């Protein structure tokens, strides 16, 4: 067995053992970075498998196209399989690359400069804000390297809103926009809370649009998308599913729930009693 394959097998074992947690995913990405520098055929073959493991089907297909043996039936079969996966999936469903230590520290610094959102405490972590090349905010006209990943609910498409214009309500006013599609309503109507949620809180990415849960006469804080693995890791799976199952929505959801999968969980936490609450939707 060659050295590349040996390393891949051990990384893959961790990837499975730790349910695709951040460390095991990052290790695969960093391995892919190293393989990209190599020219040996064995390294490139392993890189194809690494791409597949990370759901980067377009990358896997394109790379395999350049190396496979067109006289070998087994390899032709593999090539055709990858071709299908490239067409149906491409790289769109790739496992996101976790930040390394240095990037994480930099992000912590950047977070301190962001406005605070009561109902969405960490929009960079949940993926509602992204960091990238600076873009001009269509509301204030300033450049920002952190911006809203979605367009709010408005007549026009409004892209690259900066966090400040969301938090101070200027974006909602200027574009007659709302950021949250819908919310659970089990408390006395409170105009201030509604305005804060719908006009001044970044929404979140989901299959069917936001449905913001509430508890203790207030909206909850949104913590991010989760699957059963994440809930188990946090040690809260049992309590969360017990409560969820009383809602009579999706049945046996603990068997199918995968973070950002076809049936995905959205985790909330009450700002007052600190209980966790789960919402689930599907594609
Ligand atoms: Zn702005
Ligand atoms: Zn509560």
Image: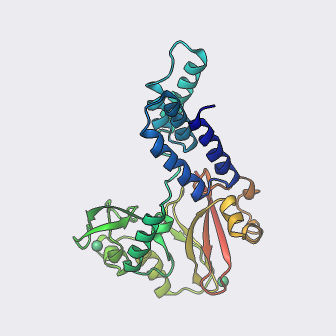
Which one is nearer the viewer's eye here, 230 or 191?
230
Task: Please name whichever residue, 55 or 242, is drawn nearer the observer in this view of the structure.
Answer: 55
Taking depth in this image into account, of 96 and 282 the one nearest to the observer is 96
Residue at the left extreme of this rendering: 141
Q: Say which quarter of the image contains residue 207.
A: bottom right
- Colour convention: rainbow
On the rendered image, what quadrant is the N terminus found in? top right
**What residue appears at the point 50 percent right and 58 percent down from the top-left corner?**
98
- What residue is rendered at 60% in x and 36% in y? 5
Pinpoint residue 203: horizontal percent, then vertical percent: 47, 68
Please say if 9 is above or below 105: above
- Res. 213 image quadrant: bottom right
Q: Give the side of residue 134 with respect to residue 153, left or right.
A: left
Q: Residue at x 36, y 79 (%)?
A: 113
Q: Position of residue 175 (x, y in %)?
A: 30, 70
Q: Nearer the viewer, residue 75 or 152?
A: 75
- Count of numbered labels shown in the rendering: 0
Q: Would you say residue 202 is visible in this rendering?
A: no
Residue 247 seen in the figure: yes
Instruction: Please tell me which residue is depicted at 59% across the width and 84% down the height of the picture.
Output: 271
Percent across and percent down for residue 277 are: 66, 73
If the picture is divided into quarters, which one holds ligand 1?
A: bottom left
Whether 58 is drawn above or below 66: the answer is: below
Where residue 60 appears, as percent x and y from the top left, is 49, 35
- Vertical placement of residue 261 versus 146, above or below: above
């Amino acid at each position: 067995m060659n050295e590349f394959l040996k390393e891949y097998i051990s990384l893959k074992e961790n990837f499975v053992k730790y349910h695709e947690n951040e460390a095991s995913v990052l290790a695969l990405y960093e391995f892919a970075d190293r393989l990209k520098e190599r020219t040996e055929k064995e390294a490139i073959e392993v890189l194809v498998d690494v791409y597949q493991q990370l759901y980067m089907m377009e990358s896997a297909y394109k790379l395999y196209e350049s190396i496979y043996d067109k006289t070998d039936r087994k390899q032709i079969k593999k090539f055709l399989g990858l071709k299908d996966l490239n067409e149906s999936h491409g790289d769109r469903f790739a496992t996101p690359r976790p930040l390394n230590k240095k990037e994480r520290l930099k992000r912590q610094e950047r977070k301190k400069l962001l406005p605070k959102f009561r109902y969405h405490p960490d929009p960079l972590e949940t993926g509602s804000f992204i960091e990238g090349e600076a873009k001009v905010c269509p509301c204030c006209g300033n450049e920002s390297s952190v911006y809203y990943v979605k367009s709010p609910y408005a007549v026009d498409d409004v892209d690259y809103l900066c966090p400040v214009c969301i938090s101070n309500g200027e974006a909602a006013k200027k574009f007659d926009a709302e950021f949250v599609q819908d919310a659970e309503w089990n408390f006395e109507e409170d105009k201030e809370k509604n305005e804060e949620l719908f006009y001044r809180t970044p929404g979140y990415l989901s299959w069917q649009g936001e449905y913001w849960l509430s508890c203790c006469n207030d909206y909850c804080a949104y913590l991010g998308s989760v699957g059963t693995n994440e809930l188990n890791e946090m040690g809260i799976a049992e309590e969360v599913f017990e409560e969820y199952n009383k809602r009579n929505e999706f049945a046996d959801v603990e068997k199918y729930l995968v973070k950002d999968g076809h049936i995905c969980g959205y985790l909330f936490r009450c700002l007052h009693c600190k209980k966790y609450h789960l919402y689930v939707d599907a594609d």
